[in-house]
Image: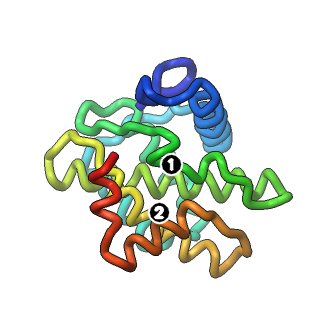
Amino acid sequence: MTYAGHEILPHTATITSKLSIMKRLIQLLLLITVLPLYPTPNSDDILIAISNIRSNFISSDTLEEGKSVLAFAEESDEVILALSVSTIPWIEEEWLADKEMEGTLKNLILIAYLAGNIQSQIQTKSSKDDPYSGWLLVCEGYEQLIEKREFKSESIEKFIQLRNEGRLVDYANQL
């Protein structure tokens, strides 16, 4: 995964999709500070950060822990992340009239996706993109968020339905 002008999507994505996802990623980066100034954590540190995110997703510390997740995603050779409209479809959805709040919620959901995906790759010692594990944490985080804030994501609701039916892993394997 890269940002700031570097390729982040498979070549099959449309230009519009690339620009939309790039815009959202840049918004996330601006929200939580400039990554080059943030030291890259090692895999043990990132697993602790991800554990903290998992234990209390709606904590104010989640964005702080998200800095570690993003730094690791950007700098580590241990993980591969393929971001596209297929893997993070909520990026293009419109949830709220309050765009600043919507951006914050989408940033939290993106942190969850990256954290779940990264955790799986580290624990399995396999540098292979794992959208399924990312989506599982997205579902958990989303369920916590909607208890506190009224909004709806059609794509995440679909992931939750597939998870509940035991079909999310099959959906991920189709990518």
Q: CA distance from mark 2 to mark 1?
A: 10 Å
Color encoding of the figure:
rainbow
Q: Is residue 70 left or right of residue 122?
A: right
Above or below — where is 17 with respect to 146?
above
The residue closer to the viewer here, 128 or 79, is: 128
Q: Amino acid at mark 2?
A: Val
**Coordinates of residue 138 in the picture (x, y in percent):** 47, 63
Question: Looking at numbered disc 1 in the image, what kind of residue is underneath it?
Answer: Ile
Residue 88 is tagged as 1
Which mark is drawn over residue 51? Answer: none
- Residue 158, horizontal then vertical, whole percent: 51, 67
Circle 2 packing at 10 Å, graded few (<14), some (14-19), many (20+), is many
> In the figure, residue 147 lies in which quadrant?
bottom right
Secondary structure of the residue carrying numbered label 2 = helix
SS type, badge 1: loop
Identify residue for label 2: 138
Q: Is residue 111 above or below residue 146?
A: above
